[in-house]
């Protein structure tokens, strides 16, 4: 190890594997240069440890120093006391061991012990960070830099998409930018295709930054790899988006199962939801149209008698169906099956962004996302099962991105909706989720526990923090890190795709230079993925 | 050759007392002196000095009523330089055997009539590279306050160092560690180092 390049911080004075390690800072090191979330290496006698700073504190050897503080305006006094009578301490959480001290072998393993007393602690060098997080290559995608360092932090994207993942953070903390960066990464390096339910039309053609500046989105950067579908043709035209397909959904395509998820947003009772199944049975495919059209009192009476539906239930259901039917993208008969179109693109390895235009109403979003996902997932499952039976190539892995995820995955509906199923069944059928949400506490804990990698920007609600960190080791330490993230461009990443939790300053997005960098990272062989590769990838 | 300033007239393991060859030829408080034993050189830090009559029973008397200056008193009474004597005591803080310096007590005390030398700045600098002697100073029982002596010793030693401030900071830090839990003492010493 090159001693000159590393900055010594102090020595280990106490600690435990469970609680983390206390490091006493050397006199010359200022506590003000430290920051939670930074990395340090600890040179034990036999192993090198890689750890993250989770707390910084001040100490004095003599209580009288706090009772009658010395005159620190005297530089001599201040100089003498720094690091001796008054000192700084770091609390660090060790996560990994990175080989022997003398550079003998550099195997990275989860930490199972603590360094011995008085082991020297250094600020992690670029090489150390690179060793742990890997260099940018055909699998790894540069997502950002650690705090106060220029090293590139890379995510192993093929590993990332193997499981469902979550991006969380308060509104305005950069979730959308982060997601856009990740989507670019996935379409370049992960051998998976994305289906994005783009509620606010920010991923397809262009998005806006907080300053109101327009930034390019996927289709402008990778026109051959992205198709933009829209529910709102007019809005797309006004925004001068070149769309590939205008989505129209026929009433006859909506099934009672699709209504179940809308119970909360439409305020339907349990009985009303049940009634939809009966109506579907009686009227067949065109049940919505027929139910709405039913005006004749005699007929209604006959129907209610036959089905034993209560009159008020029927009326409220009728009103709700009418609400849905008023959505402009719903038509009695769709000219073309959207699901087939989407699958057609996905099969060719083209990512699909579905823009909602003006229909940012949550009812529309839930209805469409649920409806399409249910059908696409069903096809994927059939194909995967067939592929397993016939021992042929499985379909291309699919990542479905949904926003406002707590509406789909809250504890009341998570067990019923397709998204709950995908989140739980994970990769069995080559289909995973990327959930984006600002209130993770609203998401079912079972679903949260199944998310492989969680990327979270600043959260300050206690319940949200608890829910994101549930089940993570070193939760208390990470809680401090998470609550102290800057409100923009910083995120904590932890879980399956990273060897240890990490705070990153996300890479720049929005300048011409950044676009060039994104486009230069394209993997040439990404197009000719073979079945073999997919087998390796998905097991 | 270092300057010979006196001769030991009383000795023990932790300290020795020497009489100066010249009346008032005392080394400053806190200065480093050394004496030669058979096997080792002993280093001491001057912690006490006095000038008094040779005979304990005979007190000096005032003689300057008709003299214009103090110097004139000594000129008109040349016997005074022989009837009075200056003595100083030094705390043993280390020894040197061969080329090796040890910052702790020697196995045997110095001998009576050993010569005492004032250490040259070079020697002071070498000796004070290590601050092990500070622990002897902080724990010694002395007729003067230890913080006075420590501050004086450090002030003296700092003069021998090219970067006096850096030396004082280093010593101050050592003291802060040695006297952790006694911050008022540290503060008092640091206050005397200016």
Image (cartoon, grey):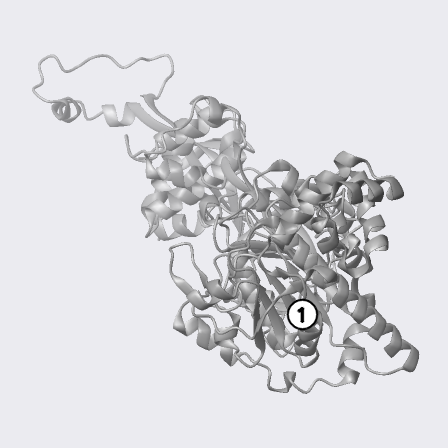
Image quarter for residue A101? bottom right
Label 1 Cα crowd, 10 Å radius (few <14 / some 14-19 / many 20+): some
Image quarter for residue A240? bottom left
The single residue placed furthest to the right in the displayed view is A389
Image: B110 above or below A532: above
- Looking at the figure, which quarter contains the C terminus of chain A? bottom right
Is residue B3 something one can see in this rendering? no
x 35%, y 50%: residue: B161
Image: B18 above or below B157: above
Residue B46 percent location from the top left of the image: 40, 34
- Looking at the figure, which quarter contains the N terminus of chain A? bottom right
Is residue B130 something one can see in this rendering? yes
Q: How many marks?
A: 1
Foreground: A75 or B106? Answer: A75
x 49%, y 62%: residue: A149
Residue A322 percent location from the top left of the image: 65, 48
Residue B183 percent location from the top left of the image: 48, 27
Position of residue A214 in the picture relative to residue A122 (left or right): left
Foreground: A445 or A472? Answer: A445
Image quarter for residue A464? top right
The residue marked by circle 1 belongs to what chain? A
Image: A493 above or below A12: below
Foreground: A536 or A446? Answer: A446
Residue B77 percent location from the top left of the image: 17, 22
- Secondary-structure class at tag 1: helix
x 67%, y 43%: residue: A319
Q: Which residue is mark 1?
A: A338
């Amino acid at each position: 190890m090159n001693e000159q390049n590393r900055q010594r911080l102090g020595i280990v004075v106490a600690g435990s594997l469970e609680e983390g390690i206390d490091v006493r800072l050397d006199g010359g090191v200022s506590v003000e240069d430290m920051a939670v979330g930074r990395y340090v290496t600890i040179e034990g006698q036999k192993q090198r440890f890689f750890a993250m700073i989770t707390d910084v504190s001040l100490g004095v050897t003599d209580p009288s120093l706090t009772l009658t503080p010395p005159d620190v305006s005297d530089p001599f006094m201040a100089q003498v006391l720094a690091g001796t009578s008054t000192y700084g301490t770091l609390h660090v959480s060790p996560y990994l061991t990175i080989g022997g001290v003398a550079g003998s072998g550099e195997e990275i393993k989860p930490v199972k012990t603590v360094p011995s007393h008085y082991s020297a602690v250094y600020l992690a060098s670029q090489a150390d960070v690179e060793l742990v997080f890997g260099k940018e290559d055909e699998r790894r995608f540069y997502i950002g830099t650690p705090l106060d360092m220029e090293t590139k932090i890379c995510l192993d994207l093929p590993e990332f998409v193997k499981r469902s993942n979550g991006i969380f953070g308060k509104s305005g903390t950069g979730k959308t930018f982060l997601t856009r960066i990740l989507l670019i990464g996935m379409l370049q390096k992960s051998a998976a295709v994305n289906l994005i339910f783009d509620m606010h039309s920010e991923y397809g053609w262009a998005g806006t930054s907080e300053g109101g500046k327009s930034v390019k989105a996927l289709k402008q950067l990778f026109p051959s790899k992205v198709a933009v579908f829209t529910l709102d043709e007019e809005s797309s035209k006004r925004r001068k988006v070149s769309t590939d397909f205008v989505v129209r959904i026929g009433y006859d395509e909506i099934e009672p199962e699709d209504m179940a998820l809308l119970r909360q947003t439409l305020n339907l009772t349990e009985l009303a939801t049940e009634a939809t199944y009966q109506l579907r049975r009686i009227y067949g495919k065109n049940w919505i149209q027929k139910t709405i059209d039913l005006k004749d009192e005699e007929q209604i009476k006959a129907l209610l008698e036959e089905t034993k539906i209560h009159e008020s239930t029927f009326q409220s259901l009728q009103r709700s169906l009418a609400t849905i039917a008023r959505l402009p993208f719903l038509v009695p008969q769709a000219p073309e099956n959207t699901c087939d179109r989407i699958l057609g693109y996905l099969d060719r390895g083209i990512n699909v962004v579905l823009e909602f235009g003006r229909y940012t109403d949550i009812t529309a979003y839930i209805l469409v996302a649920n409806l399409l996902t249910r059908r696409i997932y069903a096809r994927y499952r059939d194909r995967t099962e067939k592929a397993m039976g016939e021992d042929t190539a499985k379909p291309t892995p699919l990542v479905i991105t949904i926003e406002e995820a707590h509406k789909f995955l809250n504890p009341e509906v998570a067990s019923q909706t397709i998204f709950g199923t995908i989140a739980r069944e994970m990769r069995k059928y080559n289909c995973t989720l990327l959930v984006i949400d600002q209130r993770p506490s609203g998401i079912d804990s079972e679903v949260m526990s199944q998310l492989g990698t969680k990327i979270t920007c600043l959260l300050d609600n206690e319940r949200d923090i608890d829910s994101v960190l549930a089940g993570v080791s070193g939760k208390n330490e990470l809680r401090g890190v998470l609550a102290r993230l800057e409100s923009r461009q910083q995120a904590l990443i932890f879980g399956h795709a990273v060897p240890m939790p990490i705070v990153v300053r996300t890479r720049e997005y929005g300048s011409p230079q950044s676009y060039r960098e994104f486009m230069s990272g394209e993997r040439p062989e990404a197009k000719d993925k073979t079945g073999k590769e997919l087998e390796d990838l998905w097991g | 050759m270092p300057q010979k300033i006196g001769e030991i007239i009383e000795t023990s393991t932790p300290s020795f007392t020497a009489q100066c060859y010249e009346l008032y030829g005392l080394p400053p408080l806190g200065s480093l002196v050394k004496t030669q034993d058979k096997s080792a050189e002993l280093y001491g830090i001057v912690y006490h000095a006095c000038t008094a009559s040779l005979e304990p029973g005979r007190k000096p008397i005032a003689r300057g009523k008709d003299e214009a200056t103090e110097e004139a008193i000594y000129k008109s009474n040349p016997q005074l330089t022989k009837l009075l004597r200056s003595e100083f005591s030094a705390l043993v803080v280390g020894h040197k055997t061969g080329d090796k310096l040890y910052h702790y007590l020697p196995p045997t005390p110095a001998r009576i009539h050993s010569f005492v030398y004032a250490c040259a700045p070079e020697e002071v600098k070498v000796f004070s590279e290590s601050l092990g002697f500070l622990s002897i100073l902080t724990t010694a029982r002395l007729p003067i306050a230890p913080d006075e002596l420590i501050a004086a010793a450090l002030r003296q030693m700092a003069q021998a160092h090219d970067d006096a401030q850096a030396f004082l900071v280093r010593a101050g830090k050592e003291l802060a560690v040695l006297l952790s839990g006694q911050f008022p003492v540290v503060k008092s010493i640091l206050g005397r180092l200016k």
